[in-house]
Image (spheres, helix red, strand yellow):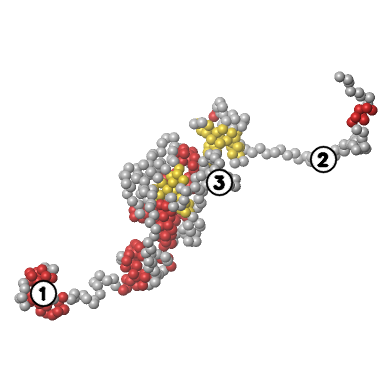
Amino acid sequence: MVALKKAKKKLITQKQAAAELGITERHVRRLLRLLKRRGDQAVVHGLRGLPSNRKIDVDTEQEAVRILSQPVYRGFGPTLAAEYLAKKHAIVVSRETVRQWMIAAKLWRARKQHIEQVHEWRPRRSRLGELVQWDTSDHDWLEGRGEEILLINMIDDATSRWFARFVDSDSTVENMNHLERYLKKYGRPLGYYTDKASLFQTAVKTKRDGSRKGKDREELPPTQIGRALQELGIPWIAAHSPQAKGRVERGFLTAQDRLVKGMRVAGVRTLEEANHYLETEFLPWVNSHLAVAPANPDDAHRPLEKQHDLTAILSHVEKRRVNNDYTFPLDAKTYRIVRQDICTGLRGAYIRVEQRRDGSVAARFGNRHLRIERCEQRLKVTSDEPTKAKPPRKPVQRSDWNDHFDLKKAPKVWQAAQASGYRKSEA
């Protein structure tokens, strides 16, 4: 203000005043004109004390608060609330603005930031398909609006790309179906990383304190999924703790927040509707916002080869021994090998029996599939004539020659020998 008054009185030049105030000469001339009209108020901004021209009107704020107060938006945070206001209600505001509105309306409570213990994470794999984490979550996804469903997720370690689907049970068949969808879409990864659930690892049975003694355990046969991965040439890696497969665990936490609330707003009630919302809304958002670019752009997935028959590999496989009449049992049923497929060495040999997921049964001996047919159960022939009762057995007559024998009153052995006239021969 002093520099402007000096320039007004011609004590200094406008250039010197501009250098002293750190503004341009043009702005100095503008301030001198205002100084003549408004006096000392010339240096005060004209909007001081007035609302900002960019301030959102009160009606918009009230409408946003009314929308977010509905039960369907219960538990929404400022970030998710701002996204849904813009997408469904055409109210485009920043996340911070929504946060201030929700705090004022007591829909959100600000939390203090706590400094957590720094944990050094395992570095990501460098290529897409080097390692895929595989797990299932049994969260209440529909919040009681429908049947209980589970979410199977395969997340790539290098990119955090999701491949998920809702199922009605965490069974071997459902996991096999999800594995088939992944293999057909992307190919065979270099490894699967899962927990030690019974689907992936055969449970070890030990006696009490057996593990403490350090006894060598015999190798157990793999599970059906473990066998399928071996036949596909995909290594299986077991995680020793939930923190070890933290990428898929943290992904489930994101889904249990955003996915649950999104399906609530969409009114999802069935398994089919949940999968439709998952594939059309949530997965595109996850793979576009949360996925990252790998360090190496090469794809590590390997294509399926000719010997990889997914129908046979992803079935329930057991071994059965062929009987002398070229039949074998399976689930209380009997199957017969077609005569034209009988070959040398088949009788008494073990064959591979595949229970396909579509309910059919296939058999293979060596590298050749055998044609089989189900045998009809033989019914027992029953006669209409009444069975004749067998005559009762005659009681066996018991000998009484030893009834009056008393060992204590019997003669000694030497006395019995003398009475018989026996004499020891002389040497």
Question: Which amino acid, by three-letter code, is at mark 1?
Answer: Ala
Q: Count residues near mark 3 (Cα–Cα under 10 Å), then give few for <14, some for 14-19, many for 20+.
A: few
| Helix, strand or loop status at disc 2 | loop
Distance of label 1 from label 3 (alpha carbons): 88 Å
Report the mark closest to the observer, 1 or 2. 1
Q: Earlier in the sequence, mark 1 or mark 2?
A: 1
- Which image quarter is the C terminus in? top right
Q: Which residue is mark 2?
A: 389
The answer to the question of whether label 1 and label 2 lie on touching residues, with beta carbons closer than 8 A, is no
Q: Using the image, tell me which numbered label, if any, was put on residue 274.
A: none
- Give x and y (percent) for residue 96: 32, 66
Give the label on residue 3, or none: 1
Q: CA distance from mark 1 to mark 2?
A: 136 Å
Foreground: 130 or 386? 130
The reply to whether the C-beta atoms of the residues labelled 3 and 2 are less than 8 Å apart is no
Taking the view exactly as shown, the residue that stands out farthest to the top is 427
Q: Quadrant of residue 11?
A: bottom left
Distance of label 3 from label 2 (alpha carbons)? 63 Å
Q: Position of residue 94 (x, y in %)?
A: 31, 65
What amino acid type is highlighted by mark number 2? Ala
Answer above or below: position of 1 versus 385.
Answer: below
Residue at figure coordinates x 56%, y 33% from the top left: 350
Q: Is residue 104 above or below residue 362?
A: below
Instruction: Tell me if mark 2 has few (under 14), some (14-19) or many (20+) residues whose alpha carbon lies within 10 angstroms of its own.
Output: few
What residue is disc 3 on?
212
From the image, state whether disc 1 or disc 3 is nearer to you: 3
Question: In which quadrant of the rendered image does the N terminus lie?
Answer: bottom left
Q: Residue at x 51, y 41 (%)?
A: 222
Residue 79 point in image, percent of width and height: 35, 63
